[in-house]
Each structure stands twice: as structure tokens, then as C-alpha cells.
Amino acid sequence: MKNNFTITNNKLFIGGMSARELIGRFGSPVYVYDADIIKRQYASLRDTITYPNLSIHYACKANSNLEILKLLRAEGAHIETVSHGEVDLALAAGFTQKEIIYSCGNISFEEQKELMSQNIAMNLDSLTQVRRFGEINPGGKISFRINQGIGAGFHKHTITGGPESKFGIDITQIPEVKKLAKQYNLTIAGIHQHIGSNILDENIFMQAIEKLLETAKLFPDLEVIDFGGGFGVPYKPGEKALDMISLGQKITKALTQFMKAYGRELHVRFEPGRYLVAESGVFLTTVTEIKETPYKTFVGLNAGFNQLIRPAMYGAYQEIVNASDMTGATSLVSVVGNICESSDFFAKDRTISKFSEGDIAAILDSGAYGYSMSSNFNARTQPAEVLIEDGKPRVIRKTNGLPTKKLLFSEGLSI
């Protein structure tokens, strides 16, 4: 297990509190986040990329809890959004309009007009969006997302660059962007890219950064270069974490050299999401039964993929530990949920300290794309979220209770 959390008397502790105490106070299942880890991750980017004109925009789709947004804003982060709802959350968390950027993906004309009326900076994603912008605001400034043919990520569904990607304007279409800009008297003030999610190879990062800097030379009026996110965290045993000191130095050097050649200093943005919050989170669940078959041992939990979908959707690996018996004798098990779907697995054929009914199963690295992708599928509840800061836990989102009753009551019915 990684050293984000501690073991005392063979039990798992998170932010100084035992998993058993947390479940006793806040129920099971429950998401628990350690604020110190979020602060640590933000500082590791802020302090290693030393280019002076830099802003770090938290990609809040990773975890959009309002208190997480407030925490990161207090640390100095700006924010990246991908829906009007996320813009509303950002404003509610105290981010100013100038601190918010919006990545447009197949949005309606109405949504684009509304964002423009709020003066939210947008990374336009298509020629259609560029044209719409020009029709609404001729003579304005635009930033657009470029697909440069570079894509990377831990799963094909998280790769956001290259010929199969739906995102961005292809690099071969830059002449068409310039034509539209001329038609509507638009200034191309920013360019943007995002190649994928959970990247652990710094060479891929630098390849993408250097490619965008090369493309930037085609635009003489730039004010902003946005390199997107993708900074990864190690989920699997043996995976090597990004060396942010090394990567930060390389990024800073590349930016400094480019700005000198470009003739002036531009503003630079990065958009980390997972990197800032994933390792802070633990999804605490309770073992409901141990099912032995002639072929396998299944450990059943009181949670399902409606509450943490990454393993089912992506085949993603997340470390699971027996928080009640961290170093006991091990057994080979498959850890499954309570959803009526065959894909409802959290782990297959995994060696873990032997579980008994009532033990706490802790799914680590669950701070990103956990609750934010949850649902009420099978009419099951969404869990509570708890933040531990300065050794004190507090509920930052209550469980949504019984969705069936709420739905019926909202329709004027009863059961």
C-alpha cells in the first residue's frame, strides 16, 4: 500500500482516524478525503513548474464537491469546467469569472451564448463554435482546442487526442480557423490541447508540450497557451509516480526558451484533475457476505458500480485493502458489489488480507471520478462524502437517502 495513509494496530487510518471510527460516525459506504493530500498535490505542481506567468486550473469533473472546490481555491487554484452546471458550482465556491475557463464539447448554441454573456473564457472545440462566436461577438478574442494527433491515457476511453478523438479542431483545419477569424475580425488569443488522462510518462508530456509550442508560432497575437491536464497517479503496484521535480524543470525550461523566441511572455495554463484529488480519497465499504463457489471466492460489499464505476467502466485497477486486518493471512478473491449487473466487480482474482463478514473493505485512490460519476442505478443510494482537515472530519455531502421515495414524493405520489 502507498504511504498516503497509516496502519496502527493492524487497522487502516485516514487523516488520523480509523476506518472503523469513520464508518461508525458517518455510515457505510462513505467517501473519505484527506485535505492534506489534496494540498500536497497542488503544491507539487505549483512549486515545481516555476514559470512565473502560470495558472493551475483544477479540472473539477474529477471531483466537483463544493467543499473540495473551496479548498483548492484557498490554495490558489483556478478552475476548469465542462458544463454550465460546473460553472455554477465554481461561482458558488467563490471563483471569479476570470478564474474560470470552459472547455466546450458539442454544446448548444444557447449554452455558448449564455457562457459568452457571463464572460467565461472558452476553449472552442469546433469550427461551428468559432463561427457562432464570430456571429455573436465579431471583433472579439478566441481560444480554441487543437487536436495535434497526440493521444495518451490509461484506457482508450480516456485518450482525448488523435484521429479517433471527438475533441478539438484538427491541426490540418487551422487554415479554416484563420479564415473564420478573418471573416469575423476575431483575434486568436489562445490555443489549447488535452491529450488524455492519467499519463505517467513524462516523455509523452514533453512531446505534447513541445508540439503545441511549435504550433503556437503560427499565431502572432497569442496571450494564452493552455496545455490541458493528464498528470497521472499510480494506481497499480509497481507503477512509478511522476517525478514532478524532473518534469517541472523540463516544462519550465521549454516554456522559458519558447517565450524568449516568441518575443514576449504569454500566460500558461495547466488543467490537472485526477492528480490533485485521486490519492486523497478512500471509499469505505462493508463486507456483507463471503460466497464460496467451486471456482472462486466472492467478497460481497454493500456498494456497487453505481457508487464507484471506474473498475466496471474502464477495467481500472484500484487497490483494495482489508481495513480491519491490514496484514493478516491473505486469500485470492474477487470483490463484487450489490448491483444486478455482471460487470459489478471492484477487483477480480486479487490477493488481499482475508475478509470476514462485517470487515471494512477500503478502496484506495478514489478521490477522482468516484462520487462525481455515481448514480442511483438500481434505485440505490449515493453515499455520503467526508473531508478530514486538520484532524477533524466533517460531512461535505450527505447521502441522498432513498431515491425511490424522493422520486415518488416529487411526483406527488406516495408508497
Image (cartoon, rainbow, N blue to C red):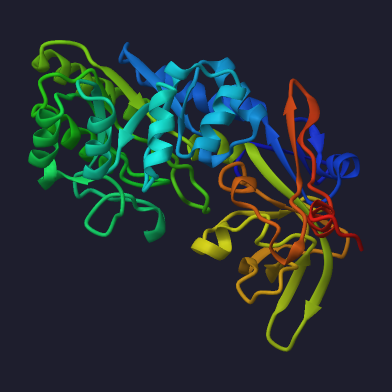
> Residue 286, how many percent across, how many down?
82, 57
In this rendering, the answer to whether 72 lies above or below 150 is above
Q: Is residue 298 above or below residue 242?
A: below
Which residue occupies the foreground of this view, 407 or 204? 407
Query: Residue 267 lies in what quarter of the image?
Result: top left
Quarter of the picture containing the C terminus is bottom right
x%, y% of residue 207?
A: 21, 40
The picture places residue 300, in percent across and down from the top left corner, at: 77, 68
The reply, left or right, for residue 352 in relation to residue 251 is right
Residue 30 visible in image = yes
| 75 w.r.t. 129: above or below | above
Q: Is residue 107 above or below residue 116?
A: below
The image shows a total of numbered marks equal to: 0
In the rendered structure, the answer to whether residue 384 lies left or right of residue 372 reads right
Q: Answer with left or right where residue 84 lies relative to residue 226.
A: right
Answer yes or no: is residue 231 visible.
no
Q: Quadrant of residue 182?
A: top left
Single out the residue that lies furthest toward the bottom. Answer: 294
Residue drawn at x 84%, y 70% is 289
Q: Residue sitting at 45 percent across and 40 percent down?
A: 241
> What's the residue at 34%, 24% (across, down)?
269
Residue at left offset 60%, top offset 42%: 2
Which one is in front, 292 or 91? 91
* Residue 362 at x, y percent in the picture: 72, 51
Q: Quadrant of residue 329?
A: bottom right
